[in-house]
Amino acid sequence: MSGAVYLVGVLALNSRFMYWNWKVWRGHDPEAPLAAFWFSIRYILGVFGVLLLDHYAALWAL
């Protein structure tokens, strides 16, 4: 269903999301929970954007 573009994009997004979750879990940065919240919104948009990009990249390759 999804290709290499999606894989690379989601790996990048997931690594950044895990970074923010790690900062929240550690609890040393008081701004980390709000930053993680805002990134989670961008994360969802990014996942859908990468999915669309992967879909159209497959069509352009034909």
Image (spheres, rainbow, N blue to C red):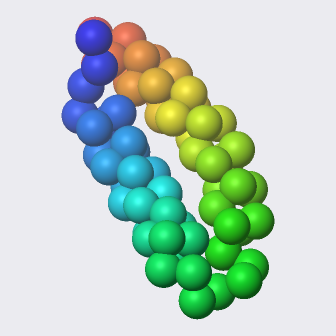
Using the rendered view, name the quadrant where residue 59 is placed: top left
The residue lying toward the viewer, choosing from 39 and 53, is 39
| Number of marks | 0
Residue at 58% x, 89% y: name it: 28
Relative to 57, residue 28 above or below:
below
Q: Residue furthest left?
A: 4
Q: Residue at x 35, y 33 (%)?
A: 6
Q: Is residue 25 above or below residue 5?
A: below
Residue 56 x/y as whole percent: 45, 18
- Residue appearing at x 49%, y 71% in the figure: 25
Q: Is residue 40 visible?
A: yes
Q: Is residue 13 above or below residue 2?
A: below
- Would residue 16 be seen by someone viewing this image from the given angle? no
The quadrant of the image that shows the C terminus is top left
Q: Is residue 2 left or right of residue 57?
A: left
Residue 45: percent from left, percent from top: 64, 36
On the rendered structure, is 5 left or right of 23? left
Q: Is residue 4 left or right of residue 51?
A: left
- The front one of 25 and 40 is 25
Which of the two residues, 61 or 10, is positioned nearer the viewer here? 10
Q: Which quadrant of the rendered structure holds the N terminus? A: top left
Name the residue: 28% across, 38% down: 7
Image height check: is 9 above or below 27?
above
